[in-house]
Amino acid sequence: MKIVCLDAATLGNYDFSVFEKFGEIKLYDTTKDKEQVIERLKDADIAMTNKVVIDKEIIDACSNLKLILETATGLNNIDVDYAKERNIVVKNVAGYSTMSVVQHTFALIFAFLNHIPYYDQWVKNEKWCKSPIFTDFSRILVSTEGKKHGIIGLGSIGKEVAKISKAFGAKIYYYSTSGANTNSEFERLELDELLKICDIISIHAPLNNKTMNLLNLEKLELLKNDAVLINVGRGGIINELDLAKVMDQKNIKVGLDVLEKEPMLENHPLLNIKNKDHLIITPHIAWASKEAIDTLMSRVYENLEEWIKNGK
């Protein structure tokens, strides 16, 4: 069989040689357009894709294709219904990066509460060397104990964040973006109330019709001064132009791992805010711990093995 991975660069330094037992494997770091996709998949039996789109036109052009392995959870880049019509099996992987995203959530929260970027630079600028005392109070650390932590999206990741934050002494509230989620352990609030009262807000929701632009100007203006807002869910949930405006008006801290357009657009409004130390942006890496990628690809391997054994 011929296996083609269309965007291997999105999987870090993973060693694909384990797949050689199934046949020839061809790796492409990136695949930029539809013509490239068709050219690369025209003789392939199996396609691997993370973000590269495989639509009806591509499926029609690739007559040998029998299996599409999504190296992620979301299937919005694949025309799953049409693939099924053409008897092409589509398999994804869920739940492989939960703890990786949880860990990154707290890395962003504590970077602000403990002023990690500020004090790292403070010491490297030799200010500690010149200090008359052993410590410094130019920035005051803030404890999570007694703080209100609002969680938007109480799925598997949101629940883990809630448990850990509670262990740090925070009071947990949540808003269900679907309207269907209930949890007796934590207090459910409507979105406006959660935004008004919480000291920390973290987003762990999918992007859909209910969450697109969920936090627009009107909602962001409800945030209290000194609130910490974290988005490790999906870009597009926060209106980024509105966020830039509010960050210039209010003393809020914002940590983002996702943006509406990725990679980040040049001259993005968030690059021009006044208080740049109130913003931390990481390039969609929360999911990508070594352990998470190893788990992901071992399950992709199992998906391929299962398809070979029983055709589904």
Image (cartoon, helix red, strand yellow):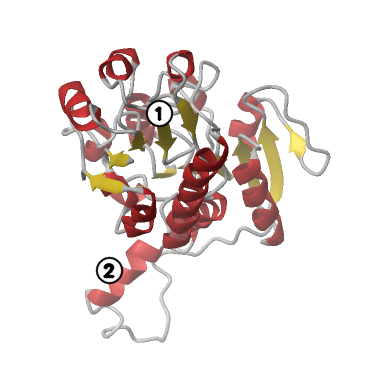
Residue at x 34%, y 13% (from the top left corner): 56
Q: Residues within 10 Å of mark 1 (few under 14, many from 20)?
A: some
Foreground pick, 29 / 143: 29
- Give the image quarter of residue 155: top right
Quadrant for the N terminus in the image: top left
Q: Could you tell me residue 183's position as x and y percent?
A: 78, 37
* Drawn side of residue 51 relative to residue 165, left or right: left
Q: Which residue is mark 1?
A: 66
Label 2 near label 1: C-beta < 8 Å? no
Q: Is residue 88 above or below residue 168?
A: above
Q: Could you tell me residue 5's position as x and y percent?
A: 29, 41
**Label 1 vs label 2, nearer the camera:** 1
Q: Which tag, 1 or 2, sits closer to the chain's start?
A: 1
* Disc 2 residue type (three-letter): Gln
Foreground pick, 208 / 256: 208
Mark 1 to mark 2: distance in Å? 53 Å
Instruction: Say which element carries label 1.
Output: loop
Residue at x 38%, y 25% (from the top left corner): 77
Quadrant for the C terminus in the image: top right
* Drawn side of residue 159 relative to residue 183, left or right: left
Residue at x 35%, y 27% (from the top left corner): 65
Which residue reaches farthest right? 184
Q: Is residue 257 visible?
A: yes
Q: Is residue 221 visible?
A: no
Instruction: Say which element carries label 2.
Output: helix
* Drawn side of residue 180 relative to residue 201, left or right: right
Q: Could you tell me residue 171's position as x and y percent?
A: 71, 49
Foreground pick, 247 / 306: 306
Q: Which mark is residue 175?
A: none
Q: Which residue is mark 2?
A: 121
* Disc 1 residue type (three-letter): Lys
Q: Residues within 10 Å of mark 2 (few under 14, many from 20)?
A: few
